[in-house]
Amino acid sequence: MTAILGISAFYHDSAAALVVDGQIVAAAQEERFTRKKHDSSFPLQAVDYCLREAGLTSADLDYVGFYDKPLLKFDRLLETYVSFAPVGYRSFAKAMPLWLHQKLQLPRVMRKSLPGYRRRFVFPEHHESHAASAFYPSPFDQAAIITFDGVGEWATVTVGHGCGHKIELSHELRFPHSPGLLYSAFTYFCGFQVNSGEYKLMGLAPYGEPKYVDTILRELVDLKEDGSFRMDLSYFNYCQGLTMTSRKFAKLFGGPPRKPEGPLTQREMDLAASIQKVIEQIMLRIARFAHEQTGSTNLTLAGGVALNCVGNGNILREGPFEKIWVQPAAGDAGGALGAALLIWHQLLDQPRTPMPEDSQCGSLLGPGYSPEYIERSLQEAGADYQRIDDEGRLLEEVVDHLISGKVVGWMQGRMEFGPRALGARSILGDARNAEMQSTMNLKIKFRESFRPFAPSVIEEHTQDYFDLPSGVASPYMLLVANVTESRRVALDHAESLQGLDKVRQTRSEIPAVTHVDMSARLQTVNAQRYPKYHALLQRFYKRTGCPVLVNTSFNVRGEPIVCAPGDAYRCFMATDMDVLVIENFLLRKSQQPATAGRAAEHHLDRFALD
């Protein structure tokens, strides 16, 4: 037996992943255990979970891989500071203590955190880890590989090819020219938090007009036909400062950055629409270049930019590839998995047999909990609950609540690895309910009213509701497709509504999951990956004729997705959620003691709004 632990840490979204004899056994982000969103600390609890899941200790490990090369990244950092000196001293002074006392001491830190481990550490390059996470779990024997993010050591984009059990990266774009940093600069300028608010910018884009596309391509970015580009760094400040954009950027776009939590104006909506169009162009051109270089009809994607599901959907519709597969944990967390798989296949030269769907196990790689543990947790919380061991009866009762307009917290099986809730740690609602989007945003998630929700659809009914090509699945909620013409409804006075007022329009038979541009970030659900969730959807479909539910992550703004039963109960009690289902335990809000609600509100107050 060969046990390999992969680790990502010290930037954002720290995680651990365990691969045993080439099989993915466990993977989880540290934030789910510490309850600190985007936790960057060494993933002690995630490592402990992975080892417990396999019945191992750190002394049993054969290899430990870290997802990038700290010394090479430090080289880039020093060279950048020297290039801009003396400008940027404040940023330099802030970064150096962390590097000198932690990041450059990584072997010592890992040795201390893994008692009993005496073997070697392996340090792949950042984008090698991303590439491995994209290709090795994919269902393809050979495929083109694209990785794109903010920056690794020096690379910001790589293109390569995977075949059998080997990967080779042949082309790269280098820092400071970066699609991830370009998108993050607009995220920052529009008042959202870098490294966590990019998906908000993507959700805001359909409310605006892409009026600044020509300005971006003329002033900020020199985009080439192969997708490579150079940025005019005089508009940006991330190389040498503590902000993403410069005064010149603000002058170009008519004023200073929007303040966080400030009112959204048409400018922010138009900027979001414009940079989204530009990033789609970049992604599509890189995809066409990758196809020219590899000749493959398959494409695998990873890196933070691969979480731009609108761009992914655009590649699928307009690009040259027949099939694409995106790593569900495409960001830095997935680098932990990639590092472990790279050691097994590339370093140890072990063969690989692709699985028909993929080998990601539905990305259900986190902890699950026994009925005994759940019941003990509920009793300790003073919860009022009902245990329903008949699964059919339980599902029928949940469907009753959904049809009556209730919002249901749904915690089943092992937790998802990656940022998307896929039916294991989800909040569910009736997609036909026109009020469901505003109810969930304002009373459950406590977030901006413009944010869209994702649909889960029974896989075999996908084409009845969404313009996704036949035979294409989206199990990990990483593709966007339009709602079909047959499910849309006529819009009254559409031309008179501007900006965020558009959210009030009913656009389709499933208004709660139809964005203002008729798109939806969908999850296709089959019985193989998600048997219990599929069974729930089937019962809802049988009762209503609709195979679609609203599916959003089980958390509130500023808090990670819930992990343990206690997390789920606190979130349930701190919101206007109506029903909570944890495995075969059903709880109704109306029957919970008031003291539990006050304790949950106190818990929720600890989380700052991001």
Image (tube, rainbow, N blue to C red):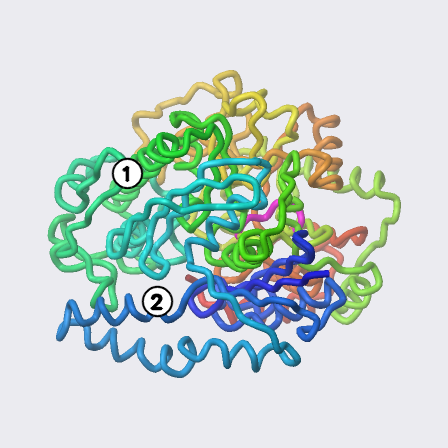
SS under mark 1? loop
Look at the picture and state if 277 lies above or below 166.
above
Residue at the disc numbered 1? 227
Q: Amino acid at mark 2?
A: Leu
Q: Amino acid at mark 1?
A: Gly
User: Disc count in the image?
Assistant: 2
Q: Quadrant of the C terminus?
A: bottom left
Q: At 13% across and 59% down in the image, what residue appears? A: 247
Does residue 501 belong to the magenta stretch?
Answer: no
Residue at the disc numbered 2? 72
Say which of 14 and 7 sits in front.
7
Taking the view exactly as shown, the residue that stands out farthest to the top is 486
Label the magenta part by its dominant secondary structure.
loop
Q: At 73% across and 58% down in the image, what residue appears? A: 368
Say which of 5 and 11 sits in front.
5
What segment is highlighted magenta in the picture? 419-424
